[in-house]
């Protein structure tokens, strides 16, 4: 009888994030891209058109969903989620950790800005027509203008940083050929 000895593939050796961390990462990434894209599609449409209004209410509903996913993600990361040490060393390690923390910080700020923006606009704040978020603030068009401005620039900063982050992840995969991208992918990929 022969015994087959299987040598482990690199994918089996490198640790992966747990499945909840992976799900929450890709769900957040999809929502952030859809939130940004929806805003830039409606920006090109004439004011008052039904499609523009629909995109705005879809943006706000996805924003509410994103805020829940984000809170769950932070909770999971600080309790049960698997935290992996950066595979890089030296300056690269500092840069990658700092970029991740900056992204978390900006995403948290963006959620707070989005809620205050809507509350000060004094317009409907519905989740896909199912229920409404109560408004604790007074309508204030001047303030809403400023929060809109901040929300817009925070959105651009997030997208630019997330793009750099994605390019770095792809660079690790195709150029450095290490396990950085694979550990954020479901097992078997
Ligand atoms: C990372 C997530 C998000 C990104 C990238 C993003 C991006 C944007 C951008 C670029 C705009 C257009 C701003 C302008 O033209 O002045 C916008 C508008 C808006 N966002 Fe977000 N947003 C995000 C999350 C949220 C969240 C969590 C909420 C609140 C639930 C929210 C509520 C709003 C509102 C109320 C508007 C204005 C809609 C209108 O003009 O009627 N956003 N967002
Ligand atoms: C808007 C889009 C995205 C956002 C906001 C985002 C955010 C983040 C954050 C905050 C982390 C840190 C996880 C932690 O340590 O808790 C992370 C990790 C990671 N992301 Fe993204 N991400 C996005 C899109 C992408 C894309 C498109 C890719 C791949 C092409 C990617 C690949 C990765 C990988 C491989 C890690 C793990 C890095 C490591 O272990 O050192 N992300 N992402």
Image (cartoon, grey):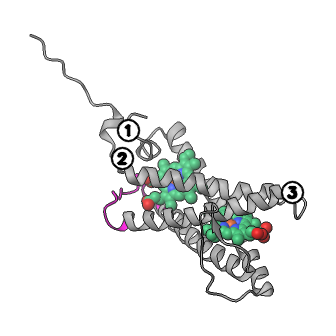
Find residue 16 and name its label: 2
Q: Quadrant of the C terminus?
A: top left
Q: Residue furthest front?
A: 130
Nearer mark to the viewer, of 1 and 2: 1
Residue drawn 71% across and 63% down?
57
Quarter of the figure with the N terminus: top left
Place of residue 87 in the rendered image (x, y in percent of width and height, measured from the top left): 40, 51
Viewer-proximal residue among 189 and 167: 189
**In this picture, is 126 found above or below 169?**
below
Q: Is residue 182 left or right of residue 132?
A: left
Q: Left or right: 144 with respect to 94?
A: right
Q: How many marks?
A: 3
Q: Position of residue 173 (x, y in %)?
A: 50, 40
Q: Is residue 157 visible?
A: no
Secondary structure at badge 1 equals loop
**Residue 90 percent location from the top left of the image:** 44, 60
Magenta segment: 78-92
Q: Is mark 1 within 8 Å of ligand 2?
A: no
Magenta stretch: helix, strand or loop mostly: loop
Q: Quadrant of residue 29?
A: bottom right
Q: CA distance from mark 3 to mark 1?
A: 41 Å
The residue under label 3 is 44
Q: Is mark 2 within 8 Å of ligand 2?
A: no
Q: Is residue 3 above or below residue 123?
A: above
Any mark on residue 187, and which? 1
Q: Which mark is residue 151?
A: none
**Which is more N-terminal, label 2 or label 1?**
2
Inter-mark Cα distance, 1 to 2: 8 Å
CB-based contact (under 8 Å), mark 1 and mark 2: yes
């Amino acid at each position: 009888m022969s015994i087959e000895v299987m040598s482990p593939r690199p994918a089996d050796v490198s640790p992966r994030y747990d499945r909840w961390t992976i799900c929450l990462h890709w769900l957040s990434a999809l929502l952030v891209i859809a939130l940004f894209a929806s805003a830039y599609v409606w920006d090109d449409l004439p004011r008052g058109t039904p499609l523009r209004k629909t995109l705005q209410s879809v943006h706000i509903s996805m924003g509410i969903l994103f805020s829940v996913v984000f809170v769950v993600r932070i909770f999971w990361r600080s309790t049960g989620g698997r935290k992996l040490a950066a595979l890089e060393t030296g300056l690269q390690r500092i840069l990658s950790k700092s970029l991740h923390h900056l992204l978390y910080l900006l995403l948290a700020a963006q959620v707070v800005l989005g809620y205050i923006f809507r509350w000060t606009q004094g317009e409907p704040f519905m989740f896909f027509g199912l229920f409404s978020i109560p408004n604790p603030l007074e309508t204030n068009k001047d303030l809403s203008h400023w929060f809109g401005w901040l929300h817009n620039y925070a959105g651009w900063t997030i997208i630019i940083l997330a793009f750099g982050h994605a390019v770095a992840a792809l660079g690790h995969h195709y150029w450095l050929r290490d396990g950085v991208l694979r550990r954020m992918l479901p097992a078997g990929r």
